[in-house]
Image (cartoon, coloured by chain):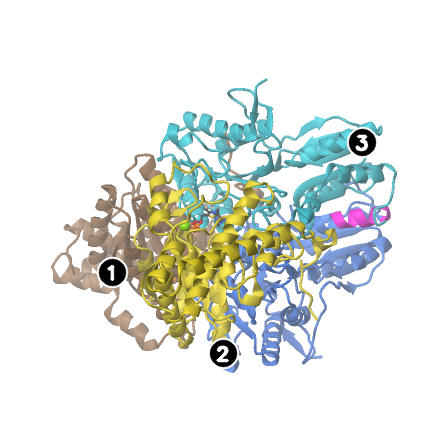
Chain colours: A brown, B yellow, C blue, D cyan
Amino acid sequence: MTDAKTNTEDYLRMYRQMVRIRSFEDQANQLYLSAKMPGLTHMYSGEEAVAVGICEALKVTDKITSTHRGHGHCVAKGADFKQMFCELLGKEEGYCRGKGGSMHIADQSNGNLGANAIVGGSMGIATGSALSAKRLGRDDVTVCFFGDGATAQGLLYEVMNMAALWSLPVIYACENNGYSEYTRTDEIAAGSIVGRAEAFGIEAFKVDGQDVLAVNDLAQTLVARCRKGEGPFFIELETYRYHGHHVGDINREYYRPKDEEKEWHTNRDPITNFAKWLTAEGIVDQAELDTIQTEIKTDAASAVAYALDAKYPDVSEVDMHVFAETP
Amino acid sequence: MTDAKTNTEDYLRMYRQMVRIRSFEDQANQLYLSAKMPGLTHMYSGEEAVAVGICEALKVTDKITSTHRGHGHCVAKGADFKQMFCELLGKEEGYCRGKGGSMHIADQSNGNLGANAIVGGSMGIATGSALSAKRLGRDDVTVCFFGDGATAQGLLYEVMNMAALWSLPVIYACENNGYSEYTRTDEIAAGSIVGRAEAFGIEAFKVDGQDVLAVNDLAQTLVARCRKGEGPFFIELETYRYHGHHVGDINREYYRPKDEEKEWHTNRDPITNFAKWLTAEGIVDQAELDTIQTEIKTDAASAVAYALDAKYPDVSEVDMHVFAETP
Amino acid sequence: MRQITLSTAVNEAIAEEMRRDETIFLIGEDVAEAGTPFKITSGLVEEFGTDRVIDTPIAEPGFMGIAVGAAMTGSRPIVDLMFGDFIFLIMDQLCNQAAKTHYMSGGKLNVPLVLRTNMGATRRSAAQHSQSLHAIVAHIPGLKIAMPSSAFEAKGLLKTAIRDNNPVVIFEDKLMYQDKADVPEGELLIPFGVANVKREGSDITLVGTSSMVQVAEKAAEILAAEGISAEVIDPRTIVPLDMDTINASVRKTSRCIVIDEGHQSFGVTSEIASRLMEESFYHLDGPVIRMGAMDVPIPFSPALEDITVPTPEGVAANARKLMAGEMFNG
Amino acid sequence: MRQITLSTAVNEAIAEEMRRDETIFLIGEDVAEAGTPFKITSGLVEEFGTDRVIDTPIAEPGFMGIAVGAAMTGSRPIVDLMFGDFIFLIMDQLCNQAAKTHYMSGGKLNVPLVLRTNMGATRRSAAQHSQSLHAIVAHIPGLKIAMPSSAFEAKGLLKTAIRDNNPVVIFEDKLMYQDKADVPEGELLIPFGVANVKREGSDITLVGTSSMVQVAEKAAEILAAEGISAEVIDPRTIVPLDMDTINASVRKTSRCIVIDEGHQSFGVTSEIASRLMEESFYHLDGPVIRMGAMDVPIPFSPALEDITVPTPEGVAANARKLMAGEMFNG
Ligand SMILES: Cc1ncc(C[n+]2csc(CCOP(=O)(O)OP(=O)(O)O)c2C)c(N)n1
Ligand SMILES: Cc1ncc(C[n+]2csc(CCOP(=O)(O)OP(=O)(O)O)c2C)c(N)n1
Ligand SMILES: [Mg+2]
Ligand SMILES: [Mg+2]
């Protein structure tokens, strides 16, 4: 692993954030399996190093746009468990007062402009956020998360063209987890994904999305360069989703071999591997990591309990927020 | 100039077709200037070698999709002056019974699937036509004409991706005339146009769009390869439009220098240069070319006169053809 | 008669038509091995191969455009659009291209394609996966719009759509995919533009589309218990729209409620109500009442989502008011 | 008072607002040096620079998406969409994103943007450059829709739109860009949701939108000469829609014709007519008559195009029928 953030505190925060995502998803999956969650949701488990490696390179004023598989981005950008679970359960205390749910979770206080249920739907939004920053003289950077499947949407090429022409401070982060729904990436993507960005004059990188330090290292460099006006950039992050496309996608052998899943779980888990490195380098010992794990799991469980008990929005809220007030 | 079609008859047909386009456009422009044409229209003059070089490599069963600047494609694919002028004037005998006009002229009998007033709007149509051919076991090839400006439309990348994945017999022909409306291409296109196609795994070529033989040579090769299942392909054709964006775009110095226009007219005219080559090579003499010019001009003028006299569709046609009959 | 689910009915219709006509193919995201997320097209790729059951990348404008071009050149594509909400992504290809090609070409080019998509809320899928957007496409001349209200209609309308020489958009209610109905084996063609009188009645006409037919039927039962006789009409297609049947019913009952799951404003209920007014005004005892989905983006929270759509109780309540001659904001 | 063209009024509104608020920028195709094909934004780039008057590539979905993101993060973009027909290309960004963001975020994110585009046929521009598509966006909750009927409204509604914290779509009639009207210098804000009674009358109400206000006014003059007193109402915004003013008028006149240049079916006229029925049924002497554009793609041929849109003579003819108590298909 490469060296990125160079002190224990940063390492531990990255570790903690990855574990927080995993724990959040484990709880969300349980909520689904026990029929306590309305609708479906898409698990980020397995991809934690991507969101954490990138978001740890960002400030709270930096922005991200997220996807249908958005819990990881949300947690990594600083969100709170309680408000997230409340949102997933449609409760009033949720980040979106229960109106958005899993697929629209947003946390404007931490610069998360929202998950999006339209694949590729946030590519323009991210690019516009970068335009705002540049025009209004702010130094914030925007990261646009999307999947390999989303690279099929023409919108990406439209906005990359403009981002390149206008040198916008935006980083396109393609989470290539090898599948879009039930289809392998090579069946839906011709040519080269990074090559496409390069053809629009955008510097593009490929990185191991399971290596949080490698991701963070690259992200720090690119974020700094964006702040200096050298954007946009494109990163393809090789990663894997452990669960099905969504929580209900249980029998998936017809499109994805069990062996492949096992290989990633066993040898490429971002949390396990980072833990190994941390202990091998003598930065922390296993006991400390275990404590962190336990703490976070407890946190997650109590946030779930809180959310289950929390109240639904009043029916009068149904036609509130259709329009914003104009003073 | 490179050698393409190798007999006089072919050369003369290409020459004739280029002159036919030029004459058609001169008449259309006159109709506009004398306020006899409803609406606006976009002149193809200057770009003749593109349409002719490509369409001369096609059979009548091959398909093309065209653009707002579509008269050239229509003539090159074999259309008749009378029906074209009738269409431009909204007359019943027009190719579309006057319902389409200049921006929607289509000539299904010659495989022209139609001009399109949505920039990029026909990229999917062309690709779908190629899919039909492949699926139904026909050997026809489809050429999709579009401008440099249209490369900004995301649809292009969506359909190129599918064309590449499915090896479709389609050729994307980008007529790069240096401008989209009142904007120079380098202001709206980042990176490399052919590079974009290549990034989708599509073989891409750049050719001098003023050299009808170079264009035809390349087109013949690629059409033949398409028929063998080696498509898709992408061609960028460097060319120039002599008139404004549309017939009403008269004062254009603010976006395009007069010198530049003069340079293309004087040194890069596709008809003049081809005529020079034809006479220099001793294939025909100038007198013969002059006769052709005169003949075609007369033809065009009499087609205009015919169209001006032709009758408008009966008002009862207004709600005809909203739906096709289903037997 | 044999009962099958709406999902099976759709599958059967596609399979039967594909067997009949080689030029038909199915195209969309995960329609092949996966059989769509709703498992509607399962088995088709095994029978017809990947050449006719075509998985696409996630590029709705692209594959819709491809379908239009294929339709113009001898194919009869069936496009699967995974959620009705994604229709916003393909509006240009659907409304500027497919809908207008026949007209713009003076009748020379045809676009015989079927766009199958869905509609319907209360699935906890939030604002971008719950919309019922049929009204907006119905506004565009050149498109036919079918709204099956059961497995029976799903099969019969889809088969008719596939044979139609025009672009047809079919909205299936995703909440009804597992609902069963009597569907005959083999050939079943339901003509477009012919409404179905689902239940006869004499006091009030309830016009419902798609799943709102069931809502209307349930309301009719509630009302029957109170001695109010409601006639229930399912237009089946909203373009073309069979106003003759609706007018005849309303001229008999003198009262009408129109129920549809699209947003109420600028929606289907407005069209039917205003046409009824123009065509049967002097037969009406009271206003035609519109009941659509609330004019709000569909909220995720179950506590809010359920109140956004018309219910049998709500329909019955309005029917009682109409019967009592109560004024509506009058 | 000073008279200026609608085009100048729009230009002035943008310039005044951009001077007032640094966060506003203008974005679209050829809006800078070229000042748009209609020369509406000429001069703005000279005053505000290319940083605030931004020429884009021909990528409507892309720049619309960029505007949405910019609006969510402190900017107030004005998007120039060259032809209203291109709205089909940006429906996802407009209707799935911009319209729903405030609601989906529980009120935490705002999208204060203005989409300026146009409408109107009879310019010989054929089916893809002549549509009036306001009804389809009006159907989507979360969007406000303004339809200026003169230079005065063009300025006043646009300035209000720019200050609104929601996505607002303005449809300008492209045939009216050179029409002049009295427009005061300086501040002019016309509130949304307040209809304008353009002409008072007692026998019949004519509700017209955009250029159909002029059609209604001309019809009113024809009718006046025959002793029929028509009231003309311009709703100015169709979302929000000022039904109070319209209802009040119709309760006075008992008769109404609604005129709009969008296609008639599933259009704006249906919405207003059906709301009138629900809200003023017992005051009506006859059906509310809808007059929209014909339900056909707009044909290119001048011989056909002109008959697709409502005319003053057509309106007057229907008014006479209503006055005479003639049945409409009754
Ligand atoms: C426009 C659009 N098309 C299709 C879908 C259905 N859908 C949801 S997620 C998904 C796959 C996305 O794949 P990818 O971008 O690789 O993200 P991943 O799920 O792998 O994280 C699809 C097809 C959608 N939500 N939006
Ligand atoms: C979707 C869409 N956007 C904008 C326009 C307006 N428009 C018509 S032609 C044109 C320029 C096209 O440039 P290019 O593709 O280079 O073709 P050229 O005119 O140079 O032949 C534009 C912007 C349009 N017709 N359609
Ligand atoms: Mg993926
Ligand atoms: Mg060009």
Q: Could you tell me the amino acid type at mark 1?
A: Lys
The chain that hosts pointer 3 is D
Q: Residues at badges 2 and 3 in contact (C-beta under 8 Å)?
A: no
- Residue B218 shown left or right of residue A228 in the figure: right
Which quadrant holds the N terminus of chain C?
A: bottom right
The chain that hosts pointer 2 is B
Name, please, the residue furthest toward the top.
D1
Placement of A93 over or under A260, stated as above or below: above
The circle drawn on residue A206 is 1
Q: Nearer the viewer, residue A296 or D134?
A: D134
Residue D288 image point, x, y percent:
77, 41
Q: Are marks 1 and 3 on the same chain?
A: no
Q: Nearer the viewer, mark 2 or mark 3?
A: 2
Residue D325 image point, x, y percent:
87, 40
Q: Please give the range of residues in magenta.
A: C274-283
Q: Nearer the viewer, residue C30 or C100?
A: C100
- Mark 3 neighbour density, 10 Å: few (under 14) some (14–19) many (20 or more): many
Q: Nearer the viewer, mark 2 or mark 1?
A: 2
Q: Are marks 2 and 1 on the same chain?
A: no
The circle drawn on residue B137 is 2
Q: Could you tell me the amino acid type at mark 3?
A: Leu
Disc 2 and disc 1: Cα gap in Å?
A: 40 Å
